[in-house]
Amino acid sequence: MADLNDPVRLAGLRGAVLRADADSILDACVARAAKIARSPIAVVSLIVRHVQLLRAQHGLPLELAVSCATSRSNSFCQLVVLDEAPLIVDDALRDERVPKELVESYGIRAYAGVPVRAHGHVLGALCVLDVVPRRFDARVVGALEQLALDVSDRLSALASSDEAPLASADVQERLVRLEQATRVLERALLALSPVIAAAQGATAAPAVDASRAAHVTPASLRAAVGCWRDMGPVAEELCEEAAAVASAAPDEAASGLAAEARALARSLAEIGPLVRLAEGVLDGTLGEAAAAKGRALVLRGALDAHEAASAAVRQLRAGALRARAATAGPGSGGAAPPSGTP
């Protein structure tokens, strides 16, 4: 049985693999899967640390199509990754293996999922779902497994697209840029607080600060959504710089930076579903009732991911400072943080 939090597996979930933008190849694969199985819904899922990201979808309810995620604990696909094998569910209402949230909220009754891989590791599943109990015969499962090879090839290509070497630059210069990026991301994560407060207030979470939630305005939500969207390019640049530093200065202080940066980028991607739901309400795509259903599925994962991202930013900045000290020449003063920074 696989470990869902295996760092080697999670390392494959990076960059273009995690993006929420449409991918024509993956979109064609899920449309084909739905046609093969004669199912109303088909999905390519990615099982991350806190959430199940829906990288491509066909036929999902609007709020799930907007958030592109559910909590990992709610997902059927986590079982595909755990066993690294197909999962067939004829009647989810009576199958004790699967979580019941999607059954209760969306009437999902039947499921067939097969593993999708990148560089030898199972990242998620290609699956089809139905709202009535049914059997998926061996012909359908075999066809899904063949189609999953195309999905896996595409995920591997997306993962590899982030591995191109960068132009050479001074290690100290890269470390300074990396540290500056962590400060930008830290401020942006703080600016996401209105989205978190609004979501907690709307779901009446026990720990919510009611006075804080009450002062959330559409303007502050729009600003927070904008901050999250701005974080994506900064996080990608941070990953590139960290990878280059680790390659150019493979000492102990630098070697962990690339892994920490990828972990941060994954956490930011896991916050995305909650932000996209807020954006859907703001732009009128989603009504409040639909958004509330979506929030119930992603809120816990987003809260955990926000906390993990904030911790990762602090760890990265500390690591960058240690690496600057380790790679600085005698008397260079490379270990000192920039003047006037908090």
Image (spheres, rainbow, N blue to C red):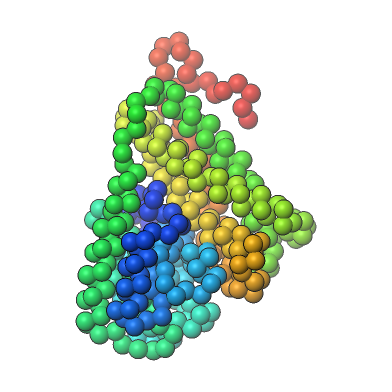
Location of residue 236 (image quadrant)? top left
Residue 282 screen position, x and y as percent: 66, 61
Give the mark count. Answer: 0
Residue 230 screen position, x and y as percent: 55, 45
Residue 232 screen position, x and y as percent: 50, 46
The quarter of the image holding the N terminus is: bottom left
Residue 311 shows in the view = no
Q: Residue at x 66, y 49 (%)?
A: 223
Residue 202 shows in the view = yes
Q: Residue 271 or 39: which is nearer the viewer?
A: 39
Q: Residue 24 or 299: which is nearer the viewer?
A: 24
In this image, 49 relative to 274: left or right? left
Q: Residue at x 69, y 64 (%)?
A: 201
Q: Is residue 162 above or below residue 138?
A: above
Residue reaching furthest to the top: 331
Q: Residue at x 52, y 64 (%)?
A: 67
In this image, 187 relative to 47: left or right? right
Q: Is residue 168 above or below residue 108?
A: above
Location of residue 187 (image quadrant)? top right
Q: Residue 36 or 242: which is nearer the viewer?
A: 36
Q: Residue at x 25, y 53 (%)?
A: 119
The quarter of the image holding the C terminus is: top right
Residue 288 screen position, x and y as percent: 66, 71
Q: Is residue 128 above or below residue 65?
A: below
